[in-house]
Image: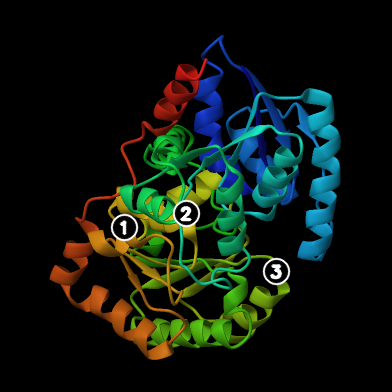
Amino acid sequence: MKISIVFGTRPEAIKLIPLIIELKKNSNFEVNICVTAQHREMLDQVLEIFDIVPDVDLDLMQPNQSLGKLTAKVISSIDDYFKSYQPDIVLVQGDTTTVMAVSLVAFYHKIKVGHVEAGLRTFKKYSPFPEEMNRVLTSRIAELHFAPTKISMNNLLNEGIPKDRIFVTGNTVIDALYLAIDKVNEVNPIIDGLKEVKIEELKPYVLITGHRRENFGEGFINICESIAQLADKYNNYHFIYPVHLNPNVQEPVNKILGGKRNIKLLNPQTYLPFISLMMNSEIILTDSGGVQEEAPSLGKPVLVMRDDTERPEALNAGTVKLVGTDKLKIITELSNLIDDKSAYEKMANSINPYGDGLASKRISDILLNML
């Protein structure tokens, strides 16, 4: 079976690398890796860690390109790639512009699509934007749906996807996390921006990430002002924030949080240093999807700076709480985790609903059964 695996961003790479490793173990599969490089530098860093070399690199990233222009470039380039390679099936992961555009071109070529991490929904067209529509459109095209949880499976069933095309596998992000933990323990990665300070000297600390488009503007101002107040309130805590390079994030973060003694603004971290930061943190404040899945396996409570989440399993399990960009809610909920040990322990000890690290093996076995 000729399998094409196409991705473009760091989160996609992280979640597909364990699957690539698993598929390459089996001689029944010819695995061809194509990257759009929707995110160039951050993508390359992850590939290097795991010694993954793409067979095709489309190198489509351009500064400040619109979603429309990116989509057009992916469609055109992937069209040529499929004409050349002609896979039996293409595997995509998640909800990026690359995923949606690649699935559409595969449909034009009548190539089967396998969607890894299928069935996530907020049921709100613009939240998250553009991810919600990317995954909905991909679901209409895909032949095989590798759902991480039963809730994701039920979302697909309710949309009319046949049950025999849906497989609950767990999430490959947990497979990747276990690989990464081993590497972190082996190499003890250096944190960019903390070379003169050991992580242990900053404990306890709150780890912060933020990059969502829907939070740009007033949302990020609220986030930064709440963090500033929390840093003043808990001066025995550090607040570590690897700041996304987008100017819509950089400007309010540097203006409001720059110069505070117990706030460390860092450059975006590569994968292993970021895993190390999560492992050593006390609490995580984020708008990231992947962090909502990873942190519970590390026993870290997560406050999600979004109004809704396509990952309700974590809410139901008690491993995360939604706080949106409401200043009062962020301050109240984070203060509660710091001040109330029982509230902290309840979240920290909740069971991660996203899997056992064997999702990639399950997907490989499903594909093998198709031969």
Q: How crowded is the residue under tag 3: few (<14 C-alpha within 10 Å), some, or many (20+)? A: few
Residue 173, position in %: x, y? 45, 43
Q: Give the residue type that dot 1 points to.
A: Glu
Q: Which residue is located at x 58 percent, y 50 percent?
A: 140
Q: Give the residue type that dot 3 points to.
A: Asn
Q: Is residue 162 left or right of residue 253?
A: left
Please identify the quarter of the rendering in which residue 320 is found.
bottom left
Q: Quick one: SS at disc 2?
A: helix
Q: How crowded is the residue under tag 2: few (<14 C-alpha within 10 Å), some, or many (20+)? A: some
In 3D space, how far apart are the residues under numbered discs 3 and 1 (Cα atoms)? 30 Å
Answer whether labels 3 and 1 touch (C-beta < 8 Å). no
Q: Which residue is mark 3?
A: 246
| Nearer-N-terminus badge (2/1) | 2
Q: Is residue 201 left or right of residue 187?
A: left
* Residue 313 badge: 1
Q: Nearer the observer, disc 3 or disc 1?
A: 1
Q: Nearer the viewer, residue 260 or 184?
A: 184
Q: How crowded is the residue under tag 1: few (<14 C-alpha within 10 Å), some, or many (20+)? A: many
Q: Which residue is mark 2?
A: 290
Answer whether labels 3 and 2 touch (C-beta < 8 Å). no
The extreme left residue here reads 342
The extreme top residue here reads 27
Residue 54, position in %: x, y? 72, 30
Q: Which residue is located at x 59 percent, y 76 percent?
A: 214
- In the displayed structure, 25 sits above or below 265; it is above
